[in-house]
Amino acid sequence: MRALPRLARSVTGLAAAFVIGGCGPGQPTAAHPATPTSAKPAPTQPAPATRSVALGHPSTTPSPVAARPVPVDCRKARCVALTFDAGPGPDTARLLDILKAKHVRVTFFLLGKNTRARPALVRREAIEGHELANHTWTHRRLTLVPQTEIRRELVTLQEQIKQLTGRAPTLMRPPQGLTDARIAEVCRSLGLAQILWSVTANDYRDHEPAVITSRVLQGARHNGIILLHDVYPGTVPAVPSIIDGLRQRGLTPVTVSQLFAPNRPVPGRAYWNAL
């Protein structure tokens, strides 16, 4: 039997925000929100066959059924979630080749404009068993826009991903990790849990693969969440050594939902790890 549900950090108060180096420069810092008790999420299921969409235009061709993630029981294995933001990008196809060769499934927090530019890669990510999540349509700082715009940023991408893969995400990541009570409320209403991170390589700023690898491996911990981007030039070349280094340290890279399984995170709440 598993121990009692793990503690996860949640957003409370009127303007709680947190950021430690994701998705671009000029990121303000703020205090951590309070910590409630929450459950862990169920593993992502394969997407059902549905219509596919190319560049936002519907097609009658059914989408192939997605592969199931590689079975991992994180109640027994020392897991860490590997996540990539803001894609698909120019190097995402190469990243998918690496992940396939390494037998690793990850979570992609997709950006709206890039899903429209590269719909085939979104479908490939789903088909190959990766988890797709919401990183907003235009990457606006959600703490600076009205609540109606927060909803629009999330709903537009939810619909796009569902059109492409047959399944809408259950996870989101606010741009630059900035969140507050209004964002939490919109996410709760949409069934989206907020997934932040426990370690990042600041790969938006530093593009040397060896530096990226070193930072990730120094910060990676059991039940942690690693933030990377598949849109910057140094990240994808670093991925093989990151995966090998994690495994050498006894850590198993998985999707976010695998990390939290067999439960699921509470919609609206923000999680920095699975502790």
Image (spheres, grey):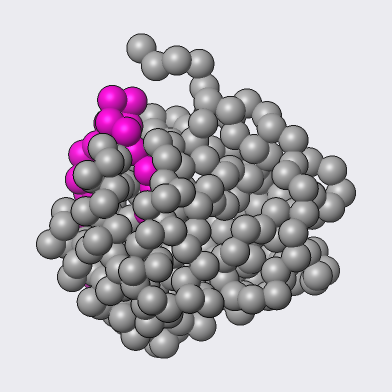
Measured from the top left, where is residue 169 in percent x and y? 47, 56
The residue that appears at 75% across and 65% down in the rendered structure is 28
Observer able to see residue 106: yes
Measured from the top left, where is residue 80 in percent x and y? 37, 43
Q: Closer to the camera, 19 or 64?
A: 19
- Tell me the quarter of the image containing the N terminus: top left
Q: Closer to the camera, 90 or 161?
A: 90
Q: Is residue 191 magenta?
A: no
Q: Is residue 194 left or right of residue 216?
A: right
User: Vertically, is 223 above or below 229?
Assistant: above
User: Vertically, is 172 above or below 68?
Assistant: below
Q: Closer to the camera, 6 or 157?
A: 6
Number of dots carrying numbers: 0
Q: Is residue 63 left or right of residue 197?
A: left
Residue furthest right in the image: 14
The residue that appears at 29% across and 58% down in the rendered structure is 242
Magenta span covers which residues? 62-82
The residue that appears at 47% across and 63% down in the rendered structure is 201
Q: Is residue 81 magenta?
A: yes
The residue that appears at 17% across and 62% down in the rendered structure is 100
Q: Is residue 126 left or right of residue 233?
A: left
Measured from the top left, where is residue 98 in percent x and y? 19, 67
User: Vertically, is 94 above or below 195?
Assistant: below
Q: Is residue 134 left or right of residue 140?
A: left
Measured from the top left, where is residue 107 in percent x and y? 39, 57
